[in-house]
Amino acid sequence: LCQINVAGKKLRWMRKLVDRQYRINLKFDDLPVLMRSKELNYAVRGYPVGFMAPPSHTGLKSDEFYLYNHLKFTITYREAASEFNGIRITGFDVHPVSIQHNIEKSLTPESTIKTCNAPDAPSVENDPNSYLPLRTGPVGEALEVLYSYEVKWVESELLWSDRWDVYLIGAPDDDIHFFAIVNSLMIVLFLTGAIGTIMIRTLRKDIAGYNEMQTLEEAQEETGWKLVHGDIFRPPQHSSMLLSVAVGTGAQIGMAFLITMICAIVGLLNPMKKGQTLTAIIILYVLCGSVAGYVSARLSKFCDNKSWKEHTFLTATALPSVLVGMFTILNIFLSMVGAATAVSFLTIIVLFLLWVCVSAPLVFAGSFFGFRAAKIDVPTKTNQIARFVPEQVVYATPPFSYLIGGILPFGAVCIELFFIMSALWLHQIYYVMGFLLAVLLILSATCAEVSIVMTYLQLCAENHRWWWDAFFNSASAGVYLFAYSLWFLASRLDLVGFLPVIVYLTYMSMISICFGLFCGSIGVLSSFFFVRSIYGAVKVD
């Protein structure tokens, strides 16, 4: 296949890859390569870069590292002329071998290697006497490595539709998905009970008491959340435009993921193809630009923002600018080191055109209809002078209230999140889109209920500045997600080098930002609905 010379820094780097048990993953006809043994009853995706032998096996003073440089592929196929033309691939296995080839100095594609492709060459097998050690020569010369492979085609009766069974059926994690759903449902039931208590007992009692006040003296003695009825619908004191942009963007993200999950469940999208799934998410996010424009425009109009052009421009560019900026800086470093994951300049241009020609016009269209719609009606009038907010208890003030509010939304998805992270970074397979859709709905319900409870407690403390608090009470789940990604990096990943860590942190930062925006938008919209409902049920003079 090829011949390379390894020495110095690259040799130390390869030894470190072997020491940290890095695996190589290949695909053929979309099937991940498998190392499996019927005798030992195991099947593992990918194959290791090499292996380590302790001194008790080698007789050396320290551990010795060996490199797998010969791959024995076994491709199984099914042929049925009465059913279809040609053949269908049903399996892709590999057996890695470490061997010191007899290398010629002038190697060409037509060269004959005595240990590999010579007519009388023996079968290439793992033999302790011929392992290829990852070390330099006696006088420090570079290690010469010849990579080779062989392919064996085996006919099989396995149906093409059943070829994924070995990857999916019997996985030990199947039952954990059910426990994750149960865990999330218990959180939702707990919050539903809390909201039921507030709505049925506390609020019903409060509303009945407020509506029975007959005299002016009784009305002047009112306490609790009714006391702030003249300020409850006052626009945010700071950055009302930014809040509306964040809520609209979060709604766009949520709609894109919801449609993606539905497409995967009905079979329009194959979750096994991660690249196809990522492309579908990006395209659906772009096509949902009208959702962001409409939601943010309605909220911005309610907050009396006059600069609709600036608002619409921010809605169309805020999140894409942040994500593209982070990605572009990362891509520059990847291109400098020649990484295979670097994206071409043409791809960046295509994404830019997709945003300019599709996303931005849709945002402007949604914003146009949002600003044309009537202003959202509210049951109370806003006072000219804002009411003084009394001193709050410590646990009800930011950032403590934000951290408290974000625990439950993150807890509702943390178990399922482990499988998603494993699929993203450990080459595992995630295919239970039905479970993921259920978790997405449970997450939405959890964010809404947490935000409602926190907003009610805030109003009972006579604090009418609830807009940004409702957003961050749920959006703080994104902070927990990023903290979880740091734990995952330290405990599950063993990355070699500084750049892979930067790649991981950059992508997880993007995911955490989008996750936080989605949760925050659910929090604001649900709290707004809750506030309109309770103040609409009270007689206010």
Image: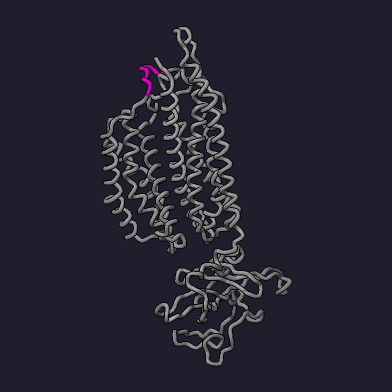
The location of residue 327, given as percent across then percent down, is: 40, 52
Q: Nearer the viewer, residue 243 or 189?
A: 189
Residue at 62% x, 64% y: name it. Answer: 19
Secondary structure mainly formed by the magenta segment? loop
Decide: is 29 above or below 100: above
Q: Is residue 383 magenta?
A: yes
The location of residue 471, given as percent across then percent down, is: 45, 35
State the count of labels: 0
Q: Is residue 394 magenta?
A: no
Image quadrant in which you'd find residue 290: top left
Residue at 58% x, 46% y: name it. Answer: 182
The location of residue 190, given as percent across then percent down, is: 58, 37
Q: How is the image coloured?
A: one colour
The location of residue 460, given as percent across then percent down, is: 51, 22
* 127 to the left or right of 459: right
Q: Nearer the viewer, residue 285 or 209?
A: 209
Question: Seen from this angle, which residue lies furthest bottom?
Answer: 120
Decide: is 358 above or below 345: above
* 329 to the left or right of 182: left
* 15 to the left or right of 508: right
Residue 360 seen in the current view:
yes
Q: Nearer the viewer, residue 433 or 292?
A: 433
Image quadrant in which you'd find residue 466: top left
Residue at 44% x, 62% y: name it. Answer: 273
Rendered-image quadrant of the C terminus: top left
Residue 489 seen in the current view:
no
Decide: is 193 above or below 540: below
Image quadrant in which you'd find residue 216: top left
Decide: is 482 above or below 137: above
Range of residues picked out in magenta: 379-386
